[in-house]
Image: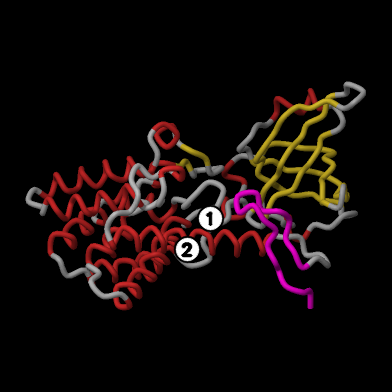
Amino acid sequence: MAKSIYIKDIKAGDKVSTAFLVAEKNMAYSQKGAPYLNLKLKDRTGEVDAKVWDNAPQWDPLFGKGDIVHCQARAVSYKNALQLSILEIRPLKAGDVDPADFFPSARRDPEAMFAELEGFVASVAAPHLKALLAAFFADAEVVGAFKRAPAAKGFHHVYIGGLLEHTLSVVRLLDVASRHYEGVDRDLLLAGGILHDIGKIREYRYEGLIDYSDEGRLIGHIVIGVEMLDEKIAALGAFPSETAMALRHILLSHHGEMEFGSPKRPKTLEAMIVHQLDDLDAKVNAIQGFVADAPDDASAWTPFHRLFGRFLYKGKPG
């Protein structure tokens, strides 16, 4: 079933008949005690609040969070925001829809991005680091997950292929930094950049809605990544212990501060550069996405960004 309209194109007053992904769902009650369903619906272009006002208890058991549903609805404006008033709703089977309609993905082809990343791997001169990176990317399970995983759940690169896009962007920046600053170990810098977020392939679930895996909630991608690193190094046999320690330190410190989840703060030149450029790339992507998704209205400012703790300037309209 082809999707007939996307959220970004819906306007107040429209009659809507199309499919959405159910991102959130809960039963609520009006001031008079009448039950209604409170929904957040998504497609690849954004999300919209929706309400099922009538017969909510009857509709409730038919679908759940993470399901794709077909809706008949009216689009209304409520407190200057678009909202859907659902008249009918029914679940759809996975085979009836194209997942690409509902899950945002990186704009660039993952195979092209991965090929470019492999070019950086090939440029690593140190034999032991080249062998380590080759061991990661000779693992079909790792490569398959690496091409699909998001880089985060709610801040930056929150889409299929986001981890690969973010990693490649960081490695490009690291390559420039290695030529700009004296005394930098380029091979170590690039290897650390390529592997700094590798644990995210297991931190998230991304077959449907992006969410944390049990391993992600209990352990987190930093420790997972170090475990994966140690496993590959052990399988290689001989590997310089100082280099292994330097790589572990990059992974353990790339969030910069303990309050942001780093077990260690950066204490080497390469670890500091990876941290700073990782942070820069994440924040640039987050700002770009937030500005792009901001309401297209007469205001030159976005809504308040909770994580940045500020409004962001879009520029004057026109």
In magenta, the rendered stretch is 300-318
Q: Position of residue 71 (x, y in %)?
A: 77, 43
- The one of 15 and 182 positioned closer to us in this rendering: 182
Quadrant of the rendered image containing residue 95 = top right
Q: Residue farthest to the right?
A: 32
* Residue at mark 1: 156
* Residue at mark 2: 281
Q: Is residue 192 magenta?
A: no
Q: Position of residue 247 (x, y in %)?
A: 24, 53
Q: Position of residue 142 (x, y in %)?
A: 32, 49
- The one of 80 and 15 positioned closer to us in this rendering: 80
* Mark 1: amino acid: His
* Mark 2: amino acid: Asp
Quadrant of the rendered image containing residue 10 = bottom right
Q: Residue farthest to the left?
A: 238
- 308 above or below 263? below
